[in-house]
Amino acid sequence: MPLDRRTFLKAAGLFSAAGLCAPLCARTAAADVVLGSVHVREARYYQRLEGGRVRCGTCPHQCELEIGERGRCRAKENAGGRLYTLSYGNPATVAVDPVEKKPLLHFLPGSRAFSLAVAGCNFRCLNCQNWELSQSAPDEVRTMDLPPEKAAELAATYGCQSIAYTYSEPVSFYEYMVDTAAAARSRGVRNIWVSNAYIQQEPLKALLKVVDAAALNLKSMSDETYRTLNGGRLSPVLQALKTVVEQGVWLEVIHLVVPTYTDDLKQTATLAKWITDNLGPDVPLHLSRFIPRYKLLHLPPTPVSFLEDARDTAREQGLHHVYLGNVPGGGDVVFCPGCGAAAVKRNGYLLLENTLKDGKCGACGRRIAGTWS
């Protein structure tokens, strides 16, 4: 069962009277921030330009920054003509979650994921569920001191089979994520990347060397919707999804159905067909219900009846595994695409039964795609 967050933080030595450790630091001049904080590292991917400017190379925004400016993610800053990340070892939230919460339904069922996030995001989603964290800078929120080695140690101590980089946008704390993932691997702990997949190819391929599973958002099949609803572009996301599969990392795709933006069955069909044709029919698709948050409080929740129709539509395009997120019972069972038998049964996040034998259906022997042990 997941640990109560306060109990976990106390036991891990990360809890203070205020609930978390003190804020990272007040923002001062860029040079002071860089020299005065252990949570700052030079960014791995950037170019130095004339006049002290820099161009970030982590995500497709490729922010060009003058000295003292921060990128769109709020987590990288040009200090003295070099680019630094301000989000290294200073997560704003840490928890132990069921892996099913990520959501991953074909990856280590019933296991626990040590989950962490640093403030910041390279998107501006109008519907963000964690906007207090994602739309803040690392030095604007309370944080805790958790370097990569300590995070890996705690994950192993609490019996977590994986570390999940989640809640905000891990691309914004890329350097911390990669180093933590490497430390986790050295302890036999696996790594889960939960992301908007808005990342350049070079850093993506380096990341995938230490990642075991990815739960990635495909928010729309419309570039216009991506620009309006999320503040990004579609094509880099599609390329990232293909690269994940090409590199052999387990992938599950999340698609949030937002009323008036993405609640269209033709778009659902287009999205599902693209997954089938480009990623394969065994890649699970999670059709998630929108709940009004942040700047879209005026919209209603997605009707469950529409999600059920969208699931049928996605299956008609050849996908073998389509689940409903934020809907009771929507992801409780993994069915064998061969004989239709219930291979894995859950009640919400609670694993009830796993009949797979070496990844194969216990009824017909067909291999079911996923990482099961």
Image (tube, helix red, strand yellow):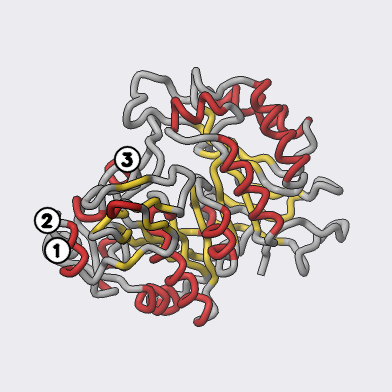
The answer to whether 250 appears left or right of 72 in the picture is right
Real-space CA distance between mark 1 and mark 2, rounded to the nearest whole angstrom:
6 Å
At 36% from the left and 57% from the top, the residue drawn is: 117
Q: Nearer the viewer, residue 3 or 247?
A: 247
Task: Provide residue 133's location: percent of width, then percent of height.
Answer: 30, 47
Mark 3 residue element: helix
Real-space CA distance between mark 3 and mark 1, rounded to the nearest whole angstrom:
28 Å
Task: Provide residue 31's location: percent of width, then percent of height.
Answer: 17, 62
- Say whether residue 247 is visible: yes
Q: Quadrant of the N terminus?
A: bottom left
Q: Nearer the viewer, residue 161 or 1?
A: 161
Query: Is label 1 in contact with label 2 (beta carbons under 8 Å)?
Result: yes
Quickly name the residue at label 2: 28
Quickly name the residue at label 3: 131
Graded by Cα atoms within 10 Å as few (under 14), some (14 to 19) or many (20 or more), the crowding at tag 1 reads few
Quickly name the residue at label 1: 32
The answer to whether 149 appears left or right of 309 in the picture is left
Q: How many numbered marks, from 0 up?
A: 3
Three-letter amino acid code of the residue under disc 1: Asp
The answer to whether 45 appears left or right of 235 in the picture is left
Task: Provide residue 196's location: percent of width, then percent of height.
Answer: 49, 45
